[in-house]
Amino acid sequence: MAKFDFSKRDSFGSKFGVIAAAAGSAVGLGNIWRFPYIAGENGGGAFILVYLLFILAIGIPVMLSEFTIGRSAQRNVFGSFKKLAPRTHWYLIGVLGVVAAFIILSFYSTVASWTMEYIYKAAADAFSGKSSDQLTSMFQGFKGGTFRPIMWQVVFMFLTAWIVVSGVKRGIEKYARILMPVLLLLIIILDVRAVTLAGAQEGLEFLFKPDFSKLNTNSILQALGQAFFSLSIGMGTLVTYGSYINKRENLTNTAISVSAADTIIAILAGVAIFPAVFAFGIEPNAGPDLIFRTLPNIFQQIPGGYFFALLFFILLGVAALTSSISVLEVVVAYFTEELGILRKPATILAAATITALGVLSTMSWGVLKDVSLFNQNIFDLLDFTASSILLPIGGLFIVIFVGWYLGKDYTRKELSSEGLFKVKLINVFILIVKFLAPLAIALVFLNGIGLLKF
Ligand code: TRP
């Protein structure tokens, strides 16, 4: 097999391109599909406060750590640890990342397939005139089927692979720059309609009025898992993207902008959805089905709803796509750089394997619905394993690596781009990645999985 030529490594072309691509990775189904339903299952307001705290105290430092590792090594996630910590076992974090990529993309593509069907349904004007109950059974009927969900999943994985094959710079950077701002605009329009619905009040209260009695230990773990999932951290996606960032970019500013964009979009998605949830009598803890049952109701109440529904689901699909390529890229960068496989076969191999696992996840709402472990179907198991276990563990070791292995001087040099920028809060950052974040992640994690009880 041919050896990879590192002098020909791809990279991002511009500052805005970096932010758009990284935000493209972060902003996805995690914000619009997952955040509202997880918040809904955990009682709303108080959960969201904990979530925001985790984004600030843990999420941003982990993201910055990933950028630091990737950019200084200029390698895929496995190769980065090999290069920065030769003759050690740190590369195992890279292995974990590649495994997590397979798991995440397999259930992610299930939800993406639902999104694709809803683009089609919106185009076919399938929502209009339907009651809330009819919309619910419409979704459940589709989700429990076999042919259509698999077909859309294959289509989605094909699109993901297609973009990844053509390289990140010319494909995704270009599209992310246009589509991310449009997505923001659309959510704002939906928000305006949602908050003016009769009964919106109750939804907004659910979202913003903290009721701490609704939190339990598991909610805290879920908030951490959601923060990791939404920011795309904990498995090396942003190590990989970081490795494509130019040495002259300011990593700190990039991490803050991307985290802010991601968090704002998640909150705006909550504002779009919860007023409608209450207005149309849907249970906030309806689970993964929540947005697919809720949003079609709102669209019917908007002048030009047909148009907006179509645009919204297309953009949701695009947001999913700009995220899924970032997950696939982790595997492809590993295959090409470490195993010497050419980009095209590497992409096909990765996408095909992931699709195979993904079909099992998709079928766990249909023919495989009785296959379960710990009361969770395959889809839930994959999501739980990745979000609540692998991502926190990955994040834990990533911050430990930066805090203890790379250390302050090395990190300062990378963050300052060799002295180009002033690094103001380096002591705070080092304090967080050395002590605070590892401790917090470890406690939340051990407590959440029940190994430690408070
Ligand atoms: N963050 C994306 C979303 O919110 C999903 C995603 C992309 C992801 N890359 C990731 C999640 C890496 C975890 C790890 O939809």
Image (cartoon, rainbow, N blue to C red):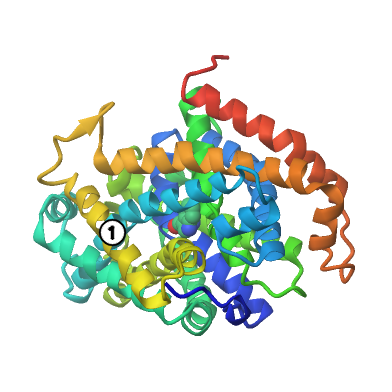
Looking at the rendered image, the quarter that the N terminus falls into is bottom left
Where's residue 313, x and y in %?
A: 32, 68
Q: Residue furthest top?
A: 453
Looking at the rendered image, the quarter that the C terminus falls into is top right
Q: Residue furthest front?
A: 1
Say which residue appears at 32% left-offset and 51% top-offset. Answer: 107
Tag 1 secondary structure? helix
Hey, which quadrant is residue 29 in on the image?
A: bottom left
Where's residue 251, x and y in %?
A: 73, 64
Could you say which is closer to the camera, residue 2 or residue 44?
2
**Residue 46 visible, this angle:** yes
As drawn, is 148 to the left or to the right of 66? Answer: left
Say which residue appears at 69% left-offset and 37% top-offset. Answer: 437
As drawn, is 37 to the left or to the right of 432? Answer: left
Where's residue 426, x and y in %?
A: 85, 51
Where's residue 203, x and y in %?
A: 43, 44
Q: Establish if 67 lies above or below 279.
A: below
Could you say which is closer to the camera, residue 341 or residue 241?
341
Q: Establish if 370 lies above or below 92.
A: above
Could you say which is closer to the camera, residue 425 or residue 283?
425
Q: Establish if 395 lies above or below 454.
A: below
Could you say which is closer to the camera, residue 102 or residue 221?
102
As drawn, is 331 to the left or to the right of 287? Answer: right
| Label tally | 1
- Disc 1 residue crowd, few under 14, some 14–19, many 20+, Cα 10 Å: few
Say which residue appears at 52% left-offset and 36% top-offset. Answer: 47
Label 1, ligand 1: CB separation under 8 Å: no
**Residue 202 visible, this angle:** no
Query: What's the amino acid at mark 1?
Result: Thr
Which residue in the protein does label 1 denote? 353
As drawn, is 399 to the left or to the right of 162? Answer: right
